[in-house]
Image (cartoon, grey):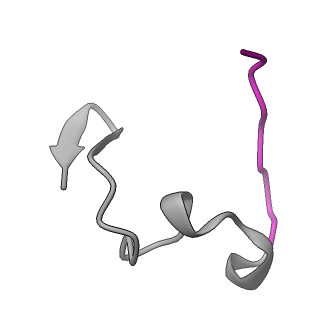
Amino acid sequence: MRPVCYQNLPQGLLPEAIRDGNPAGVSRLVDGKREA
């Protein structure tokens, strides 16, 4: 795997798994806190 950075990219262009609100429901860490 290769690290990828999405800085200042509009929400509509981001992969669904990392958009604000987490519409895909993917378990992830945001600012050190688990979101589901």
Along the line of sight, which residue is nearer the eye, 17 or 9? Answer: 17
Question: Residue most toward the top?
Answer: 1
Q: Position of residue 22 (x, y in %)?
A: 38, 69
Most common SS among magenta residues: loop
Q: Quadrant of the N terminus?
A: top right
Q: Quadrant of residue 9?
A: bottom right
Left or right for 32, reference 16 = left
Q: Quadrant of residue 5?
A: top right
Q: Quadrant of the C terminus?
A: bottom left
Q: Residue 29: within the magenta?
A: no
From which residue to which does the magenta span run?
1-9
Q: Position of residue 4 (x, y in %)?
A: 78, 32
Number of on-image labels:
0
Residue at 77% over, 49% down: 6
Residue at 29% over, 66% down: 25
Residue at 74% over, 22% down: 3
Q: Quadrant of residue 12?
A: bottom right
Q: Position of residue 18 (x, y in %)?
A: 53, 58
Q: Position of residue 31 (x, y in %)?
A: 34, 39
Along the line of sight, which residue is nearer the eye, 24 or 11? Answer: 24
Left or right for 13, reference 24 = right
